[in-house]
Every structure is written in structure tokens, then in C-alpha cells.
Image (cartoon, rainbow, N blue to C red):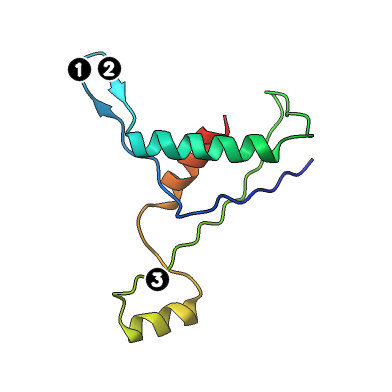
Amino acid sequence: MRVTFFIPGRPIGKGRPRLVSSRHVITPQRTREYETYVKRIVHYAMQGHEPAAQDVPVGVTLIARYPVPKSASKALRIRLLDRGWYVCMPDLDNILKAVLDGMR
């Protein structure tokens, strides 16, 4: 089974949890909101599909696209067009963590 879905908007990386007291750790609100957003999209995309069993391996392909900032120089824009991609924050692994946590 293959399920494909698109998450509109700018990808957001998983924020670092903050220690509030000696026993409480809080995930940033922006991360919680993004994970909830992803969860809704995945829930809608999975309608009509049988969920995978917990012991079945699952593969994930993620493509994160960011616009080149308007502040980028013309030379940088040309280099980026030649290369075909733009490196920026957040790291891809943080984006993947946020998406996978939202898929739970």
C-alpha cells in the first residue's frame, strides 16, 4: 500500500523540548501545532486505507521545499538555480522528526 500526501505551507522542524521544572518537559507550542496540523492531513489521506500493523516496516520519503529568501543576491540565486536546491534552517532531520511525530 502506498499513501501520498502533501503538507501545504513552510516545513517546520521539531523544536527542542524545554525543561520547565525538575520533572516536566514541554515541547514548544509551534512544534505541537505543526504536529497536529500534520496529523490532520495524514488522517485525511489515510481514509479508506487499512492502517499498517505495528510490526510492519514503513518507508517514508520526504521532500521539503523552501523559497529562496528575497534578500539573496543575484549571484546566489544563479548558483542555487544551477545546483537545484537551497540549504537553510531547520535541518532535514528536525523536519522529519516533526512529520513522523505528527503521523503517530
Relative to 58, is 33 on the left or the right? left
Residue shown at the point (41%, 45%) measured from the top left? 94
Residue 74, quarter of picture: bottom left
Amino acid type at image mark 1 = Ser
Amino acid type at image mark 2 = His
- Between 7 and 14, the residue placed more toward the observer is 7
How busy is the neighbourhood of tag 3: few (under 14 within 10 Å), some, or many (20 plus)? Answer: some
The residue to which callout 1 is attached is 21
Q: Is residue 30 above or below residue 86?
A: above
Relative to 64, is 21 on the left or the right? left
Amino acid type at image mark 3 = Val
Residues tagged 2 and 1 counted as in contact (Cβ below 8 A):
yes
x and y percentages locating residue 99 in the rendered image: 51, 41
Question: At numbered mark 2, what does the secondary structure look like: helix, strand or loop?
Answer: loop
Q: Quadrant of the N terminus?
A: top right
Question: At numbered mark 3, what does the secondary structure look like: helix, strand or loop?
Answer: loop
x and y percentages locating residue 82 in the rendered image: 48, 82
Judged from this view, the residue extending furthest toward the left is 21
Q: Quadrant of the C terminus?
A: top right
Q: Earlier in the sequence, mark 3 or mark 2?
A: 2
Residue shown at the point (39%, 81%) measured from the top left? 77
The residue to which callout 3 is attached is 68
Q: State how far apart marks 3 and 1 are (Cα).
A: 39 Å
The residue to which callout 2 is attached is 24
**Which mark, residue 94?**
none
